[in-house]
Amino acid sequence: MRETLHEKISVNLVFDCETKRVTPKHLKWHGRPYTITQVGLHHTYRSGRTLFHVFSVSDGTMFFRLELNTETLHWLLTEVSDVLSD
């Protein structure tokens, strides 16, 4: 089941200087850690002067949509679903 959220989360990411890519590796939601095994879409959008990065990721069981606010450097979980149910 797909659920729309607006919850603060913690995210660990890796920056690869050779490819110049940022990749989320782990997230923590409601105190539970998730290891990201697949990164799907990544896109950006602006709201006023603030740039947001949006990542669609999975841990193999769950799908997560993550948003990074580049002004505050805060992460939000905006969507979650059970991969097996969709």
Image (cartoon, rainbow, N blue to C red):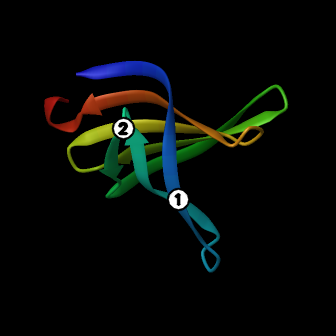
Q: Residue at x 44, y 20 (%)?
A: 5
Towards the viewer: 20 or 77: 77
Q: Which of these two is toward me, 34 or 65?
A: 34
Residue at x 50% of width, y 55% of height: 12
Amino acid identity at mark 1? Leu
Q: Residue at x 59, y 65 (%)?
A: 21
- In the rendered image, which residue does mark 1 sit on? 13
Secondary structure at badge 1 equals strand
Label 2: state its secondary structure. Answer: loop
Image height of 11 relative to 8, above or below? below
Q: Which residue is labeled 2 in the image? A: 31
Residue 65 location, quadrant: top left
Residue 15: % across, % down = 59, 67
The C terminus lies in which quarter of the figure? Answer: top left
The quadrant in which the N terminus is found is: top left
Where residue 49 appears, as percent x and y from the top left, is 85, 32
Kindly identify the residue that appears in the image at 15 percent across and 29 percent down: 85
82 sits left or right of 4 in the view: left
